[in-house]
Image (spheres, rainbow, N blue to C red):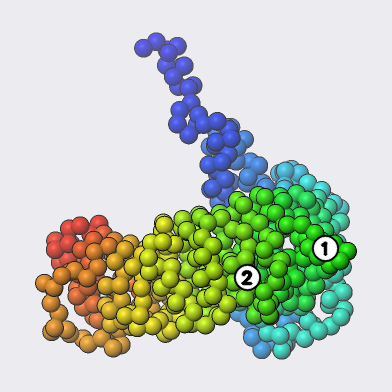
Amino acid sequence: MSSTNKSVISESPTGAFNLPPKVLSTILSYLITNHLESLNEWKLQLPLLSICQKWRDAALPLVYHSIFVSCSCKNNEIDANDSTFYDKNPSNAKFNSNIDLLVKLGYFRNVRGLSLFMDYQMGLIPFITKVQNFLRIVLPSWDHIVSLHAEVKSKENPETVHQNTLSSSLDTAVELAKNFKVLLPNLTSLHMNAVHGDRVLEDKVCRKFSSVLINEYAHQLIRSSCFIRVNLDSPHFSKQLTHAVLRLSPDTKVDTPWIYPRQLAHLYITDTVKDSLWKAFYSKSDNNEIAANIEFDHLRYLGIMASEEGSPSSENAIYSYLFFPKLSHLTVNFSKQSANLLSQSHIPDKLDKFEVIGLSIGSIYIHQANIRLDSRKKLAEFAKNDSQNCFWAMTNYLFGSDEQTCGHSELLITNAASIPNPDNLKWTYLSQLEIISDLQANYLHLLLPQLQNMRELVVHNLDFSNMPATDTNADSQQPPFNKSITILRINYKESETNNERALLFIKLLLPHLPAIEELFMPYFGPDFYAFVKEYAVTYPHIAGFIPENE
């Protein structure tokens, strides 16, 4: 081969180096995240800029897309009884940001997003004040930033956070929110979330700040996600709004339209205020009658999570005027408002995904759901009452036949103590079951025969307390009692006694699960591998005994 041909071949890019720029950029977007909480995490992405010029051109706008500012406690210790929480000196906080490096490298003009993370020891007001000072040092106005993502983690202790009740703190929160409008005048995407553990922060200062921020930017937002209770003062959202996630305060008064429904593709609203929510989408005639149908022409995803205080006292005619012709995903909870939505609104008979959230018990997920009007009316009867009996009755209705469940179906149970006797359950067409809280091992034995179309079973905190150390009545020759489960995941509180009982439980169980392919269970030392060695020969169809926590 001539040297000329060798040169041509060596210069011809192949594989990942010969992808079109847009394809390469799309692939890299899955590797690069802009919502990071530490400078070290962000620096881990920088090597992508050094592979070659083509990769650098594709990765640079992604790596330098966002400024992040995070604040965390230096020692991660919080005194839950500290009433001076909001008076702490910000010097006790550890700040992280890539803004200095972006300025030094001259890339701050490439920035399109701002990500904020506040963790624990610092109050919202001093944190936001510091962030705004950071930004002003570089530029008086960041008009090229179009996205704000804020995660606020703080302690929830209303009795000790005394500044919540001070009008001066609320006034400062209003001022800081309006300052953002000056600093970031061209925002089109806003995400706000405040949590402590799994609970949503109920902080008056945080709620006030978030409410003002959304009201200030409403007219220009294309995407709005707010998981903090906000009180909106009849905002006028942009006609281009496509994505809206709002957690409305019960005090929110909806008297006039403020969302244009036609362009919406994603709408998720929680804590809705009775039926007045829908007043945000329509106007009334002079004689107080509904002027026209509310048509959500592009809506694909709808989630309505009404609280008890947001449930209507009786049926309302407005629901028959709601049209969702292209809806593919629907999420509801147990409430009268969800019941009215299901039974009266115009929803397609087939959905890609249908979810019912029962916060105190569990959640139902059905893919490729077939819910015609008669099925929706039946579901509405269950949804009107957030009781345990209604939840289990709904699961029997949905999983008892293949009429509603056309595809994959899932059930998540968070309160195993409320599960009825297995004889009262009809889950023949349930595909996947996950149980979070304590479940008795002997109950699981009784439940398995009811799950004849299940593919995956996940049990957390399995309880072996009522299980004997030995079982002399085990009969591995009896017919298999579940021929469908292929994946089994088991976890429990580890102890020497529980480890022994878990091994016995699995040994008794496996002969009756002939379709099992993968078994996940806690790692408990040499006994686990002895068990695997013994049963790998007996059950060659099992691809792997996989320890969950090795």
Residue type at tag 2:
Asn
Quadrant location, the C terminus: bottom left
Task: Give the residue at x 62% y 70%.
Answer: 340
Residue type at tag 1:
Lys
Percent of width and height locating residue 80: 64, 86
Q: Is residue 12 visible?
A: yes
Q: Residue 491 is drawn in which quadrant?
A: bottom left
Q: Residues within 10 Å of mark 1 (few under 14, many from 20)?
A: few
**Residue positioned most to the left:** 477
Disc 1 to disc 2: CB gap under 8 Å: no
Percent of width and height locating residue 241: 73, 52
SS at badge 1: loop
In the depicted view, which residue is nearer to us: 83 or 223? 223
Which residue bears the numbered disc 2?
340
Mark 1 or mark 2: name the one nearer the start of the chain.
Answer: 1
Label count reads: 2
Q: With 203 as the anchor, is 332 left or right in this view? A: left
Quadrant location, the N terminus: top left
Task: Give the residue at x 42% y 85%.
Answer: 417
Compute the Cα span from label 1 to label 2: 20 Å
Which residue bears the numbered disc 1?
284
Q: With 114 as the anchor, is 257 left or right in this view? A: right
